[in-house]
Amino acid sequence: MQNLASLHTLLLHELHDLYDAEYQIADVLPKMRDAAHAEDLKKAFDDHLNQTEEQTRRLEEAFAALGEPPMREHCPGISGILQEGKEMMEEQDATPDAFDTALIASARRVEHYEMAGYSSAWRLAQTLQYHQVADLLNETRKEENITDKKLAKLATKTAHLAKGDIASRVSS
């Protein structure tokens, strides 16, 4: 971790962390898409991958606005969340709907991490009056909230399907 002697260096640390997180997420999303059963979930993961690529580009634009090169600082927080998701994808005994529900839960953990990171960086950029950077981060922050809401709706639908599957197995 770099020296956090000022709010400016703290913001850079947050941006480096987010930049690495986006790369890690982009690496895992295709695996999640391939593991998913439901077509609407596969599409949600494809959409999230496209969004992640755009968010990475936005971070590069924020670094440029600060006169800094885009650099990745390993993000152990997202690594842990993604590792949990990878372990869950190895589950062999789940029904397709239960498995998809678990995938969505993993994806929402990722979203919540990103929401916290982008909100914190956005507030720092606002405080430092880095308006262009704040605008870029705010756009991503809003996207993360929208994605989380979409995943929540998918989770409700998929969990109801899984519940129906369990009920039919119990009654037979």
Image (tube, rainbow, N blue to C red):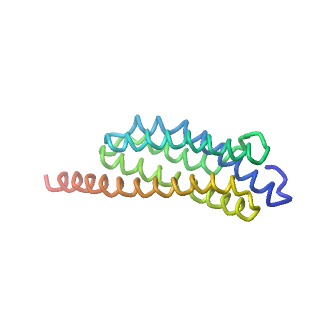
Q: Residue furthest front?
A: 132
Q: Residue furthest left?
A: 172
Report the label total: 0
Using the image as rendered, state which of residue 65 and residue 31 is in the foreground: 65
Measuring from the top left, give residue 81's x and y in whole percent. 56, 50
Measuring from the top left, give residue 71's x and y in whole percent. 73, 40
Q: Residue at x 54, y 42 (%)?
A: 52
Name the quadrant containing residue 69.
top right
- Residue 12 vs 6, above or below: the answer is above
Q: Residue at x 79, y 49 (%)?
A: 1
**19 left or right, relative to 92:** right
Q: Residue at x 70, y 44 (%)?
A: 74
**94 left or right, relative to 52:** left
Using the image as rendered, state which of residue 14 and residue 141 is in the foreground: 141
Measuring from the top left, give residue 48's x and y in whole percent. 47, 44
Measuring from the top left, give residue 8's x and y in whole percent. 80, 56
**163 left or right, relative to 36:** left
